[in-house]
Amino acid sequence: MDIEEKPRGGPGGRIALLIDADNVSHTKIAGMLAELSKYGTANIRRAYGDWAKPALKGWTDKLHDFAIRPIQQFSYSAGKNATDIALVIDAMELLYTQRPDAFCLASSDGDFTPLVMQLKANGHEVYGFGERKTPTPFVNACTTFLYLDSLEDPSQQAAAIEAPEASSAAKVKAQPKAAAEKPADKSLAQNTKLVTILRGAVEASVREDGWALMSAAGSAAKRQAPIDPRNYGVKNFTALFTGTGLFEIAKGKNGQSYVADKRNKDRAQRPGG
């Protein structure tokens, strides 16, 4: 069967996951794969590094547990990162041979920015994972970028589900207090770049009544920049819009959430949907 005829895997097709093991902790692999499952199937999984280094010892079991192919790359010259070069070469080879539907680069190294741009120029989505120190150009180049400390660990989630009933009961009692509306986060409101993106997203999806469907506004925001609410300490776009204190959030007659810019004084009192 020709490459062009290969069936797409998962809801978003086949994803090539390329991991810079020198810059990503092995403890994050489960969370990365869980996140990628939202976009498709990571059926190409490779991790790059000099596996003789003691610093990568923790990766050994993870490679087997998650069916990740280790790519050995020796450091031929001191001070030169041969791992980066090997990853880039493989990415370009995969682009023209295996032809995955999307790529995922797990690294905090900004040197991969040109690679991301090239992959996107060829019509591919590029998802990124990295630490907070990841250079802004690399973050902005990706279709979606998520900081590793924002990832939830699936194993911890499972442990929480199996917790004693007494603990669950205590959480239920605490819910009313947690559900109270949080005051606006000044740091979010003062983030000029974020506010500009959110206002632009509402403007791009607003209806005649001055309200925008929350899902449409969220999608519009992600089309502008690789924005993920979890990078700002909240779980979704509803919480992100609310956290700035600059937007009005309301439920429509259809039960869906809507958002409006508070500066728009001509908006309807309630969304018509």
Image: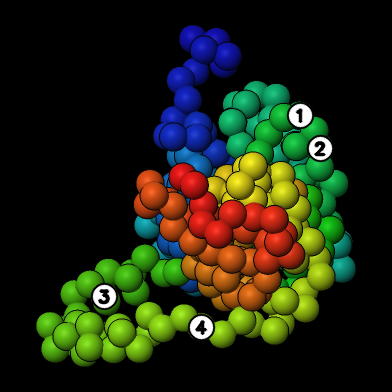
Label 3 is placed on what type of residue? Ala
**Helix, strand or loop at mark 1:** loop
The one of 85 and 164 positioned closer to us in this rendering: 164
Query: Crowding at label 3, few (<14), some or many (≥20) Cα neighbours within 10 Å?
Result: few
Query: Crowding at label 2, few (<14), some or many (≥20) Cα neighbours within 10 Å?
Result: few
Looking at marks 1 and 4 on the same chain, the residue that comes earlier in the sequence is marked by: 1
Which percent across, then down, holds residue 204? Answer: 71, 44
Left/right placement of residue 8 relative to residue 230 reads: left
Q: CA distance from mark 4 to mark 2?
A: 42 Å
Q: Residue at horizontal 46%, vertical 81%?
A: 181
Label 4 is placed on what type of residue? Lys
**Helix, strand or loop at mark 2:** helix
Q: CA distance from mark 2 to mark 3?
A: 41 Å
Q: Residue at horizontal 75%, vertical 53%?
A: 200
The one of 60 and 94 positioned closer to us in this rendering: 94
Which residue position holds label 3?
A: 159
Q: Are marks 1 and 3 in contact (CB under 8 Å)?
A: no
Query: Crowding at label 4, few (<14), some or many (≥20) Cα neighbours within 10 Å?
Result: few
Q: Residue at horizontal 46%, vertical 20%?
A: 7
Looking at marks 1 and 3 on the same chain, the residue that comes earlier in the sequence is marked by: 1
Which percent across, then down, holds residue 240? Answer: 59, 68
Q: Quadrant of residue 185?
A: bottom right
Q: Quadrant of residue 161?
A: bottom left
Q: Is residue 208 above or below residue 148?
A: above
Which residue position holds label 4?
A: 182
Residue 118 shows which numbered tag? 2
Label 2 is placed on what type of residue? Gln
Which percent across, then down, holds residue 39? Answer: 50, 43
Q: Are marks 3 and 4 in contact (CB under 8 Å)?
A: no
Residue located farthest toward the left when viewing the structure as drawn = 165
Which residue position holds label 1?
A: 122
